[in-house]
Every structure is written in structure tokens, then in C-alpha cells.
Image: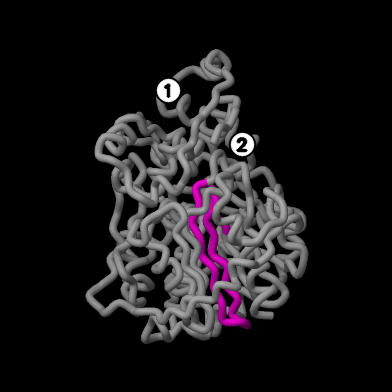
Amino acid sequence: MKTTLSILLAGLFLATACTQQPAETIKETTTEETMELSPVSDFKDGISPEKALEYRREYRTKDFLVNGDLGTYSFLNLPEFYQTATVYRGAGQVAMLEKEVDESLLNTMTDTDLGKMPLKDLLKDEQARIQGVLVIHDGKIVLEEYPGMRELDQHCWASSAKQLLGLTVHILEEEGLIDLEKSVTHYIPEYNSSDWKKVKVKDLLHHTSGMDYVETNANFMNPEHPLAVWTANSLASRFEESKKSAFDIIKDVKSYIEPGVKYDYASPNTQILGFIIERVTGEKYEDVISERIWTQVGMESDGHYVLSAQGEPLSAGAFSSRLRDFGRFALLYTPSWDKVADTQIVSDTYWEKVYDNSLADALKRGVETDKSKYFKDGQSHATYQWDLVFDDGDLFKAGRYGQGIYVSPETNTVVVYFSSVYMNEVYFPGFARQLVQQHYR
């Protein structure tokens, strides 16, 4: 597969920031290149020792964003490229899921950037670069496909992992450790600017902080913007220099609008919540996730959070696990939660908060959040780190490069998937909702 690109792209700013090159170097190195991408099926069969060694030596942060072959391999092998913190599964038995495959699900008609096609064709499309899809209905696996990874591989969730944090914030709120109405400064006194004093914990949780690190392409492309600087330093690989911590970079960010007005998706919001979780518990972030969630579910394996070059857990999304464990996590939001856990982790009070649609107007005012092309019905609001809550009660969270978790409590169905979309240029989140609508409603 050939893809022509200009290397004035989201990713080159990372090479610039991480190697401390002057900004003008970007213009000097802007060229047209042709990149050959290996089919994702090549990664399903495993990589030779020689090729793996080549990837390990050549990987740089820009490869995480460009997501060519190096990025695809890194998504399956995060601990080879970054320091990681372990989220332990505990000593309990694995929650084995009954399998009752429904081949008709492969005929689900999907409407994507690549056009309308049945799911079976989307799974084969080399632009979608889907590596794994899992559908669980009524607590049984009804579809499990691995076009581009091995069953035991651990894949990066990207921003889908924000749901681990969103649920944890709710749990700590119920424990009385977090008050959503308190300011960020209350929990992190070092963030003592007038701007931060106005931002409440709930503004971070719902992506309405109003801080100037909104996740837009323009901000990613500007190497001097706080979002670009934060990303570059946080994801610096072992061969690159990181001069500032994520904590210090975010501390200096200014507001651009009052909190609570607009839904502006921004991973730094999630990162700060991770810092707050550590402050209120006195525990490492990964241990909190392990104790409150991962050890409470019959997971197959440990999970791993990437650590920044400064040693901070990247709670905003650099987490990896097996696909089935992703599915087990998703089941916690359905009536079949007891198939994987002994106690109800997603409490009834969680649903009261998540289904509160008072943030509907904030979503409509948001920057680059129009998903009507992919979800043509029932979009309501965004809350608790979910990208969308639908009028029928379904929930969706996307991850960059084609990761996703779709939960339908009413139909007792979950869809989780991993992909490795080159340059994040193809988007196909609607297929999960279309599958639920066509087969279970």
C-alpha cells in the first residue's frame, strides 16, 4: 500500500520539540515522500528478530503520531519503546467468556470515511488497518476477529483508556475522596494561577475546562503551543530529550474561555485528573486502577501504562491490554457485569450522573466535535470522559488511530476494537452503533 504525504504533519512538530531543533527547521525538512505500509496482517504472524531490532532502534516519538509500520509495531509492544507501569490483574481466576459466534454480524452495513461496506470488508480494508474487533452480547462473545494482531498481543487503547480514569474518578467520588465541585487548585496547590483557580474538577472530567490546550490539528501542528509541547515531552522515546514534565507544562497553561461553556476535547484534562487521583489516594496512579478495577475483574493479563520521560503515568490514554480484557472492562457497564466481576463496580449512581444531559449545549458549542457524519441519530451529550452519550443510553469513546469502546446497556452489548490507522486519516467509529442498531434493536 502506498501513501503520499507531506511531512508537514502532526508528528514532525514532535521531532522538532524533542530534539530541540529551531522552528525554521520544519520548513527546511518539508518534503514529499512515499511511505510503504506493510499490511496489518503481517503483524498478526509476528515480526522477525531482525525487523523487531530495526524497529526498536529507529523508533522516535513522531512514529507514534504518523503511525506507519513503526507506529503499528509500537502499538502492539509499548513496553519495548517506553518505560511502563504495571496494572496488575491480581491472583483470581480468569473470567472465561462463553463463545457463540454469529457470522451474520460480518454482514453489518457500515458507513465510514471509506464508503458504505459490510463489516467483513471493513475488516480487510488496508486503510482502516483494523487489528482486532470483539463483540459481546448477553455476556457471550458473538464476534472475535484478529486481522492484524495475535490473540495474546497487548494493544494500545489510546484515548479509549480515558474510561478507566473516568470510572475511577466516580469511584473515588463515592468514597468521598474527590469532590467534583472543588477547584483544581484545591487538590494541586501548585496550580495557583487565577485561571486554574476557576477550573473545577468537573470541568476536567467533562472536557469543559476552557484551558488553551484544546486538541485541534492547528494546536498539534504548532510546535510552540502547549498541547504540542506537552505531547512532545510526554511521549519522548528513549532516544529523545524531554526537558519538562507534563505536570510543569500544564501548570503554565492559560484559559481562553470561561470553564463550563464549551466541550473542548483535550487530553491534558485527563492527565491532570490522574495527578489528582494520586494526590487524594496517596497511591501510584497505576495501583489505584489496579485496586479499584483491574483486580476486581477476571482479567487474563496485566495492563501497562506508558510513563513519560519524566516518569509520570500517561493517564490520558497510553495504556495497553489484550482485546478480551478490553471487552471485560466494557462489560462492567452492562447487565452482564456479573460474568466478569463478583461485585458491581459501575454503581447505579454512576448512571444518574452520566445520563444527566445538562451538558448538551456545551457539546454543541464544542470545537471539532461534530460527529453527525458517523452518528446520525440520537446524540445527546458528552460526560465522564465519554465522547458521546446517546438518547437511547448507549455510550461511545474513541481512541486515536481507530480504537474504540461502544457500550449499549439496554441491549446488553459491547463492541471494542483496535486499529492502526496511518496518520489518523480514516475514521470509522459508526460501525459499532450500526451493528447494535441492525442486530439488537
Q: Quadrant of residue 5?
A: top right
Q: Which residues are magenta?
A: 398-420
Residue position marked by numbered label 2 in the rendering? 219
Q: Nearer the viewer, residue 326 or 51?
A: 51
Tell me the quadrant of the picture where the C terminus can be found: bottom right
**Type of amino acid at the residue the image marks with label 2:** Asn
Q: Residues within 10 Å of mark 2 (few under 14, many from 20)?
A: some
Question: Is residue 269 in sight in this rendering?
Answer: no
Residue 264 location (% of width, % of height): 65, 51
Tell me the quadrant of the picture where the N terminus can be found: top right
Residue 194 location (% of width, % of height): 58, 47
What secondary structure is found at the residue carrying circle 1? loop
For marks 2 and 1, the one nearer the N-term is 1
What secondary structure is found at the residue carrying circle 2? helix
Pick out the residue farthest to the left: 91
Classify residue 344 as left or right of residue 441: left
Give the vertical position of 85 relative to 33 (above or below).
Answer: below
Residue position marked by numbered label 1 in the rendering? 20
Residue 229 location (% of width, % of height): 49, 34
Cα distance between the residues tagged 2 and 1:
18 Å
